[in-house]
Each structure stands twice: as C-alpha cells, then as structure tokens.
Amino acid sequence: FWLLHYIPAYFVDAVCWLIGKERRFVKLYTKAYKLFTLTSFFTTNYWQFSDKNLKHLLDNLNETDKQIYNFDVTCIDWKELMLIWCMGLRKYIVKDGLADTDYAVK
C-alpha cells in the first residue's frame, strides 16, 4: 500500500519542494484515500432494494397529496442530485471546501 501510493506522492512533493513549487500531492492523496475508505462499504457491496410499497403508495395518492408529498423518483433531476452530493462530500467529508468551483462564485 505505502509503496504504490504514498511513496510516489512523497517523491513528487520532494521534487516540488526542490524546484520551489507547492507540495500538495501527499495531502491530495490523503484526501482521496479518506474518501475511498468512507465510501468503500457502499461501493463494494451488492445492494438490492424493493420499491413495491412506494409504487403502491404513489398509485393510491390523490392529486392533491401527490403535489404535497412529491416522492416520485421519476421527477428527480439526477444530474443535479449527483452534483449536490459530490459537493457535499467534498465540503463535509473531505473538508476541501468549494473555493475553486462554480458554486463558490454564487
């Protein structure tokens, strides 16, 4: 593990230090490794969910209740959801902040 991951990062940081550049690769790899270890349980296991009850409940709601309790997953903008999820991971889990993203400008 150390041989293939951290030692190259330390080597590149040493070269950066010698030429007067910012040393950031060990910090970057540490963040990436932290993110990997936090999400590995969910990404390496097989998950199977059943949505029979959800479909039944959605079919039995009247139009007023459907507007109040909108939980129809076909209405979700998945691109936007994944973007928000990734920004949340970056800000709250990796503690990287959003300084160099489009959201920092807003």
Image (cartoon, rainbow, N blue to C red):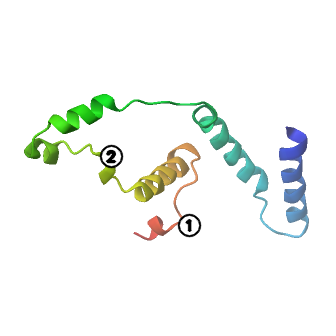
Q: Amino acid under label 2?
A: Val
Left or right of 81, for residue 97? right
What count of labels does the image hold?
2
Q: What's the residue at 56%, 66% (across, down)?
A: 100
Q: Residue at x 8, y 45 (%)?
A: 64
Quarter placement of the N terminus: top right
Answer with left or right where residue 3 lies relative to residue 44.
right
Residue, disc 1:
100
Asked which quadrant contains residue 105, the reply is bottom left
Left-right relation of 16 to 39: right
The residue located at (79%, 60%) in the rendering is 23
Q: Quadrant of the C terminus?
A: bottom left
Q: Amino acid at mark 1?
A: Asp
- Left-right relation of 86 to 58: right
Q: Is residue 39 above or below residue 53?
A: below
Mark sitting on residue 73: 2
